[in-house]
Image (cartoon, rainbow, N blue to C red):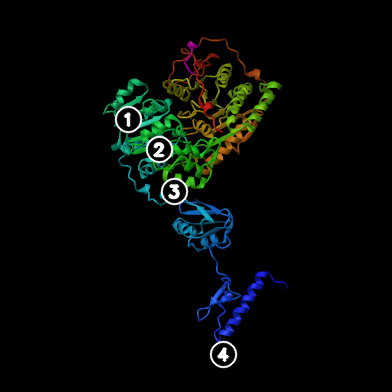
Amino acid sequence: MSCSKEEIERKRLAAIQKRQLKLSSPSSPLGNISISNTTQNSPSFTSQNITGRKLYHPYKKPEINETENIPVTKVISGTIYLISEGRFEVNPSEFCVPLINIFKSLPSKCYDANTKLWNFSIDDYDQLMSKVAPLAPHVVLGALPAYVLKVIRENVTDPNSIDLTPVEATLRNRLMPFQEDGVRFGIAHKGRCMIADDMGLGKTFQALAIASYYRHNWPLLIVTTSSMRDTWQNKVCELLPSVPLMNIVTLGSGKDTQLIADKQTEVVIVSYKISTMHTDLLKSKNFGVVILDESHHLKSNKSQCTSALGRVCRGAARVLLLSGTPALSRPAELYTQLLLIDNNFFSSYTEYGKRYCAGKQTNFGWDMTGQSNLAELQILLQKKFLIRRTKEQVLTNLESKTRETVLLDDALLQFSKEEQQELSQMAASCRDSRPADRHSALITYFTESARVKIPAICKYIKQVVCEEGVDKFLVFAHHRSVVRAVCAALDDTNTRYICIDGATPAAARTELVERFQLGAACRAGVLSLTAAGAGLTLTAASLVLFAELHWNPGMLTQAEARAHRIGSRGGVRVRYLLARRTADDLIWPMLQHKLDVLNNVGLSGDTFKDNTMTHQGNNNIKQYLTPNPAKNKNDYIPGTNIRKNAIKYNIQQNDNTEPECTKETFLENDQDDELLANLEL
């Protein structure tokens, strides 16, 4: 049997040491002759005899040197991240014996056979890092960010121990149990948090309750969308009657600026757009409590609005953010919002992006469109920043919401062979072009797809009007051309409707919503997806139709919640109208991917994967047509196809007479939504 060179050398050294033992024995004729020079290059596989000499034992396990077996030219890296509030996991780039031995020496060690990774208690983190430090530069582990360690180790007040007596009684007595939990959460975090409950769960009530608890820190600033300013003013008067109406200022123009400086002014309500025009004035008021409604409008760290409100919030003692969709598609959108809550949140946007957005540097700067360490980010959010409950968790009596996808009839899609070829080229351009060019390519493709879908959409709307079991319904669209076409289709069927888009005045929206909610004859609501997809309560609808998609899933779920919220009667059906060989082929998978990312962070529980698929029927479109002559638009209530003198509007009315219709309504001054210019891929 042949032996390797190592084994031959080992046996040779063993023979030498055996001979040394004999020579050093008192009975040996050679006495104590030393041959240390012979063994000075021997390996460290030794034991010790009585005299202190190191002796070799052929069956003894080798003593492990921590830096042994690590090539000098190779660096073993590893990442550390949280898997729960109390434990972290280590993921080395490859197997390393010294590192594994360190893992085994920690008392809280735990090996996961599924992931083949080691995890430990957060209490052993410092010990692990100190033991790994001597292995540098051959072994390097990426440390947990100092901010994450600080959040995990800090003590938070127990929300259950908080007394809500300081909250004004009128409001306190109207809070539901889960809303009380949200108020206690905000107070436990010293009034600096985000309430990210599902749309329709009463975030307004919770925010005003927290603000009422900290009444001693007022004046109060409420920043919201333009269409919701009057709604917030009404809620403050209703829920906080101790605040005089004269002490509430809604900033709508420069005429109201003098009222803000008045010492008696306790509450100021302003839109995001106007806040950028009067930043210095708002900052000089020294607001102690700030409520930012629909805070996802501040997702960009480059926007003027984010910068302006950052200056205002920096001096406030309490900052409350409200949003049912805090991140519409990716973790990068959370940074600016979290920074408003905690000024010390991470050292920079770059550090946050590298940790949670898979940030990488490109020729065009940092790319923060990815996602990484999402489990740790979710732990950080829940521990420090936000509370989120879904309708399924807290509203057990709320009827379910079902989603369906309707595949539109290909025969009704309005394109020739040449146009079909152009659309195919646009689709290829969106898939194959560089990220910098993909922006404009998708805008063009999305716009052309809307034009192509119009005939099929209109036919389907007319089918819905005659569908059994459908009383009131909503139709969401994005482009003006689609909104006009839907209104014309409803005119053809003599169906009364309301319409709200970007040009609808804020004061008129409340009246239109009441007309839809309480008017028995008004069956449909035609809404702009970006202008009317949030802030409205339209629970009278049992069906929600999406004539067009949107690339941000948060926009769609927000729009769904206009009907599916507290106060809805019966279940709500949601239908997405999709057409093959259009931009829907690209946007629909994109939506699901973005939802998966948000689900991993704990900011969404929705999915579009399990939708029921149906096909558009082939009914004769002519049976739905009832041509109407052109009418004077001044004869009709703005935003509707209802004659001014046809009925005297009353909340108690139950008039089922069919109105005369017009195809030209309220859209002449429509302004296109600006989101196309902010398209993100």
Disc on res. 119 = none
Magenta highlight on residue 357: no
Tell me the CA gap for discs 1 and 4. Answer: 104 Å
Label 1 vs label 4, nearer the camera:
4
Q: Earlier in the sequence, mark 2 or mark 4?
A: 4
* Residue found at the far right of this picture: 1
Res. 37 image quadrant: bottom right
Q: Which residues are magenta?
A: 633-639
Tell me the CA gap for discs 2 and 3. Answer: 17 Å
Crowding at dot 2, Cα within 10 Å, few <14 / some 14-19 / many 20+, comes out as many
Q: Camera-side residue: 638 or 571?
A: 638
Question: Residue sitting at 49 percent across and 53 percent down?
Answer: 88
Q: Is residue 529 visible?
A: no
For the residue labelled by badge 4, is the local secondary structure a helix, a strand or a loop?
A: loop
Q: Earlier in the sequence, mark 3 or mark 1?
A: 3
Magenta highlight on residue 635: yes
Q: Kindly identify the amino acid type of the residue bearing the numbered disc 3.
A: Val
Disc on res. 267 = 1
Read off the residue under disc 3: 148
Res. 190 image quadrant: top left
Q: Earlier in the sequence, mark 2 or mark 3?
A: 3
Q: Kindly identify the amino acid type of the residue bearing the numbered disc 2.
A: Leu
